[in-house]
Structures are given as C-alpha cells and as structure tokens.
Amino acid sequence: MNKFIFHVVDSEIWEKVQYNEFYENESLKSVGFIHACTEDQIAFVLKTHFNGKSGLLILKLNTEKLKSKIKYEAADGYTFPHIFGPIEISAVELIFEINSP
C-alpha cells in the first residue's frame, strides 16, 4: 500500500470542513467510499473527472493516519484507492491548489 494517496476536493467544500475532525463527501453516502488516487494517477483523474473545473484542491493523505479501510479497486484501466469511511483531517499532510488552464 502507498504511504500517500490523493483526493481532489472543491476549495469551497474544503473551506467549510477543514477545521472539523473528519471530512466526508457525497460519494461516501452514495457509493460507500471516498474516491482517491495515487500520485501517478492525478493527471488522469483531473483530465477525466474534473476537466474544465476550477477552484479545486488536491489533498495529500497519509494512509498511516487514516483509520478508515482503504481498498484498491479497478476502474478506468487503473487500480484506485477507495477510502471506506471518513478522512481524518489530521491525515491531510499537504494541500495543493490546482491552477486552472
């Protein structure tokens, strides 16, 4: 398992939750997990799922600090890490702002 995985989040959503103990998003409720990716999958994820969107952040997550189960599952020709529960804010090591094209 990778020590670090990444999650893309809208900056407005992050602004509202960054001081909470946990972060959850709609996919956790709708499909049962939070989407994440490895470092080498970031460009693909941004192009495929967030193309043309602005105001996005990438959260670098330390998997050793996540209490929720992480399972790697196949999708779109890749094996992505899925987080089956909330993300502890303390697991966020770095936040990268994505520059819009």
Image: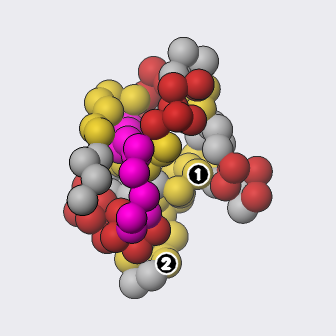
Residue at the (39%, 64%) spot, across then down: 52
Residue at the (46%, 37%) spot, across then down: 11
Task: Assess whether residue 16 is covered by the magenta stretch.
Answer: no
The three-letter amino acid code for the residue at tag 1 is Ile
Q: Residues within 10 Å of mark 1 (few under 14, many from 20)?
A: many
x and y, in percent, of residue 67 in the image: 56, 33
Task: Assess whether residue 57 is covered by the magenta stretch.
Answer: yes
Q: From this viewpoint, is residue 63 visible?
A: no
Residue 75: numbered disc: 2
x and y, in percent, of residue 38 in the image: 32, 57
Number of labels in the image equals: 2
Q: Which numbered disc, 2 or 1, marks the residue that appears first in the sequence?
A: 1
In the image, farthest residue toward the bottom:
77
Instruction: Say left or right for 25 vs 4.
Output: right
Q: Which residues are magenta?
A: 50-61
Residue at the (67%, 55%) spot, across then down: 27
Work out whether 51 lies above or below 69: below
Residue matched to label 1? 34
